[in-house]
Image (tube, rainbow, N blue to C red):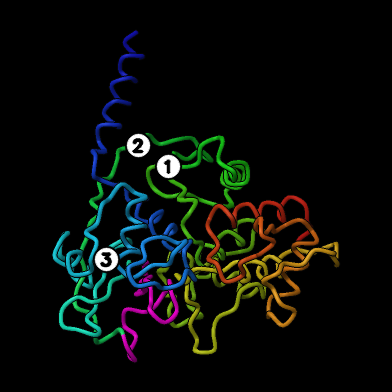
Amino acid sequence: MVKKLGAWILSLLMVLTLLPGQAKADDRENLVATAKKYIGIKYKWGGTSPSTGFDCSGYLTYVFKQYDITLPRTTTDQFNGGTAVKKADLKLGDLVFFTTYRAGASHSGIYVGNGNFIHASSSKGVMISSLNDPYYWGDKYIGARRYMKETVASLAVLPKGQYHDVPSNYWAFNPITNLSKKGVMNGYENSQFKPTKPVTRAEAAAIIANALNIDASSQYSHFNDVSTKHWAVGSINAVKEAGIISGYPDGDFKPNQEMTREEIAALISKTFVLTKKTTDNSFVDVSTDDWAYNSIQLLNANNIVSGFPDNTYKPLKDTSRAEFSAFFYRAFTTLPVK
């Protein structure tokens, strides 16, 4: 009875840790993932929905409303609300503001990390741009505001392979759980996996090195942007030597760069022997002159990757950790390694 009461009190305290109007750190990543779903939606002055199109402030109110956060409707009012944030202290989900056609805040977007923001552009609709774009946005930036307040919940440490944000009915539960138990993939603190977070080049390198049991002991830095103290330096060196992932012509590896679905297809095709060579099914948005066309087709033929209900593959879409888990697990359990 005492044990049951203690467990009940612990559960209650964990629930009370998160108060209304506050958000877990993961909510920032989820909000950014939600915002990216609308990339390509057209611009419309006064627009507040995907069906009609968005203007810049209408886009922000639509995204934040899905997280029970009500933003002021206009860019000016959004800039005058929230909590001011220094550019150096930006977090995912912060609002960023610019002065364009008039004095004061006249354009806004959502910070998505790595110096980039997503916004409803009058020329191209919802898109991602650089805050420091030297040709336009860089010198028009005027500040940022924070509307998401986060509180870190104290969560129980779960057994290996179990995560608070990957319930048993989650679509990628099996690959995430099995790869984690095998030590191929790892989660984050507080037994979080962050399934919607895009997978980075460093994470992909570590996953492959773990899965193939490649020697990752070398701490020598082969790339300008990977120090000898980087958490994945050994794995990055290992996959480079194996010819699976290479760097860029400028000598960088870009370890924190998020990987697209076509990049993941190319990566998996370099790692495993794809036994089936042809398929009658082609994705409508992957042309034969796409640099990753053959990799995508081969993985499709071998039932490693899947598309969307409209028969698209979305090759330029960032690959979430859950998607990568599913793709990699299918290859890891059904195909021989090269």
Within 10 angstroms of label 3, few (less than 14), some, or many (20 or more) residues?
many
Q: Residue at x 65, y 57 (%)?
A: 308
Q: Residue at x 59, y 57 (%)?
A: 324
Q: Nearer the viewer, mark 2 or mark 3?
A: 3
Which element carries disc 2, helix, strand or loop? loop
Residue located beneath label 1 in the image:
191
Residue located beneath label 2 in the image:
155
Q: Residue at x 30, y 18 (%)?
A: 6
- For the residue pair 102 and 3, the one nearer the viewer reads as 102
Residue 94 magenta: no
Q: Disc 1 vs disc 2: Cβ atoms closer than 8 Å?
A: yes
Within 10 angstroms of label 1, few (less than 14), some, or many (20 or more) residues?
many
Residue located beneath label 3 in the image:
95
- For the residue pair 196 and 155, the one nearer the viewer reads as 196
N-term mark: 2 or 3: 3
- The answer to whether 121 is drawn above or below residue 19 in the figure is below
Which element carries disc 3, helix, strand or loop? strand
Q: Residue at x 86, y 67 (%)?
A: 278
N-term mark: 1 or 3: 3
Instruction: Report the magenta residues as a range.
Output: 112-136
